């Protein structure tokens, strides 16, 4: 097998759809569980966020290829933090940020759960959070539980995007997260929530079952 063919098998590509980096392609390493959101669904998501994104402070948890966070930065987000635990994927994120000259984006090689739990209370909250953990992992509900408890992470009317198995029950959706948009493609569900007023003290969270 040639060196070129081997390299092609070990990397993937994703295209930035719009904004200052429109049409640019970035590469990412072949990492188990890393599955970038496809072009069509990203286009749908960013149409949903069209009036929210410019100037927004964004957090891309489980960033992987960076398809969501880098797209947000390209489209005018004021700041994007991309968290990725895998070392090689995190390095690729940093390289791609430099390649695309996206000065608003920062890649961090850290556990999303650890980083969220230690986020300082006096730091600025986030306007948009992208939550796309490894498929069929417990990380989704673990992350939701932290977001439900760490109220300082989210701006008053923050948007939360979740990508997950279409039948997966989300056990810790706060009562003040209102579902705005929903789409299913194959066995994957795509959900956009908006944070409303604070939940009642005796009802901090609820289970959200997409099949209902």
Image: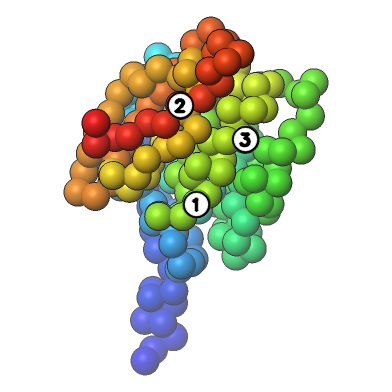
CA–CA distance in space, label 3 to label 2: 14 Å
- Cβ atoms under marks 3 and 2 closer than 8 Å: no
Q: Residue at x 40, y 55 (%)?
A: 136
Residue 76 in view: no
Q: Residues within 10 Å of mark 2 (few under 14, many from 20)?
A: some
User: Image height check: is 19 above or below 41?
Assistant: above
Query: Which tag is nearer the camera, tag 3 or tag 2?
Result: 2
Q: Residue at x 61, y 13 (%)?
A: 201
> What number is the disc on residue 138?
1
Q: Earlier in the sequence, mark 3 or mark 1?
A: 1
Instruction: Tell whether 15 sits left or right of 198.
Output: left
| Most distant residue in the left direction | 186
On the image, the x and y values in percent for residue 9 come to: 38, 75
User: Image height check: is 105 above or below 94?
Assistant: above
Q: Residue at x 34, y 44 (%)?
A: 168
CA–CA distance in space, label 3 to label 1: 13 Å
> What number is the disc on residue 146?
3
Residue pointed to by mark 2? 206
Q: Residues within 10 Å of mark 1 (few under 14, many from 20)?
A: few
């Amino acid at each position: 097998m040639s060196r070129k063919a081997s390299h092609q098998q070990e990397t993937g590509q994703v295209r930035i759809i719009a904004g200052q980096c429109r049409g640019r392609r970035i590469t990412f390493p072949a990492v188990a569980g890393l599955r970038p959101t496809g072009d069509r669904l990203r286009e749908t998501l960013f149409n949903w966020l069209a009036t929210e994104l410019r100037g927004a402070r964004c957090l891309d948890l489980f960033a992987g290829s960076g398809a969501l966070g880098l797209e947000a930065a390209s489209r005018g987000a004021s700041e994007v933090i991309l968290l990725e635990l895998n070392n090689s994927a995190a390095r690729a994120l940093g390289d791609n940020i430099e390649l695309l000259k996206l000065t608003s984006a920062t890649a961090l090689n850290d556990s999303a759960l650890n980083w969220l739990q230690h986020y300082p209370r006096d730091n600025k909250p986030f306007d948009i959070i992208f939550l796309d953990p490894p498929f069929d992992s417990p990380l989704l509900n673990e992350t939701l539980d932290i977001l439900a408890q760490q109220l300082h992470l989210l701006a008053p009317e923050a948007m939360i995007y979740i990508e997950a198995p279409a039948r997966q029950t989300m056990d810790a959706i706060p009562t003040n997260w209102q579902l705005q948009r929903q789409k299913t493609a194959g066995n994957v569900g795509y959900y956009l929530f908006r944070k409303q007023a604070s939940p009642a003290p005796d009802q901090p969270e609820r289970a959200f079952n997409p099949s209902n």
